[in-house]
Image: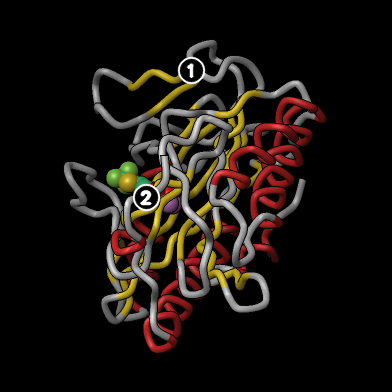
Amino acid sequence: MAYESAQKIVIKTPEQIEGIRKSGALAAATLAYLKPFVQPGVTTIFLDKKCKEFVLDHHALPATLYYKTFPASCCTSVNDVVCHGVPNNTTILREGDILNIDVTTIYNGYFGDTCTMFKVGNISEYASNMLKIAKTCLDEGVKQCYSGNKLSNIGKSIEKYARSQGCSVVFEFCGHGVGLSFHEEPEVSHNSETHRDAILKPGMVFTIEPMINAGKARTKIDKWDHWTARTIDGKLSAQYEHTICITESGYELLTGDMEKLVEF
Ligand code: MF3
Ligand code: CO
Ligand code: CO
């Protein structure tokens, strides 16, 4: 089904895009700031504390803090955690873990949303390969970002690549319009099951954030915090996220500095 009118997907003005670009740069800078703290022995709550300090020091707010019932300034998702890992004082990073940190900033009223994967010390070849596949999935989605293309081609190409590598794509969490608020239209599916399609147009701003699983696609939510989403089979999951703007000539990554952090 197509969006009945384009009204629901807000076309951002150049001024708004500039605001989101600044917020996106700060979100990416937060991830860069956190990188040296990602070490064996560190708790996820410590990383959250550092995240909060950095964002506040830059005159911005962490969008996840008190969003619905979320209690922290970032999401920290280790190994089999797919997304929305709640920072806590009992999750201690261990050598060989893979960690996703997802940061959304509100700067001057504008939202920038990005996440990347970190290696805790040395990781296995198997884990490293998962990171590579998940990053390539994001890149495959980004390649479909041009005016006139169908929104649904993003998820289609992500799923095609993930499957070619023997991996599955999480369908319970999607990318989203972003910028003037945290989660806007459209919903960005990461697989071929799109409910509503749209034609991409200059000024649309949304995230692509595929969660790629080594095993089954299904997830389950931890009973004790109602947030942490894990793979149903306990296998690894990895995710990278950009905030992207459709332009006249293609796209712009509004969180492009995340790229500097990518390592497998
Ligand atoms: N930043 C996440 C996203 O990419 C959303 C986290 S919502 C939270 O959409 F409540 F879990 F923090
Ligand atoms: Co997002
Ligand atoms: Co995010």
Q: Residue furthest bottom?
A: 15
Dividing the picture into quadrants, the one containing residue 236 is top right
Q: What amino acid type should be assigned to the residue bearing mark 1?
A: Arg
Q: Is residue 85 above or below residue 20?
A: above
Q: Is residue 154 left or right of residue 76?
A: right
**Residue at 39% across, 72% down:** 11
| Residue 186 percent across, percent down from the top left | 39, 52
Residue wearing tag 2: 3
**Residue at 60% across, 67% down:** 147
Q: How dense is the environment of label 2, judged by Cα within 10 Å: few (below 14), some, or many (20 and up)? A: some
**Residue at 62% across, 36% down:** 98
**Residue at 34% across, 38% down:** 86
* Disc 2, SS: loop
Please state, as top left, top right, bottom left or bottom right, where the N terminus lies in the image.
Answer: top left
Please state, as top left, top right, bottom left or bottom right, where the C terminus lies in the image.
Answer: top right
Q: Is residue 101 above or below residue 219?
A: below
Residue wearing tag 1: 218
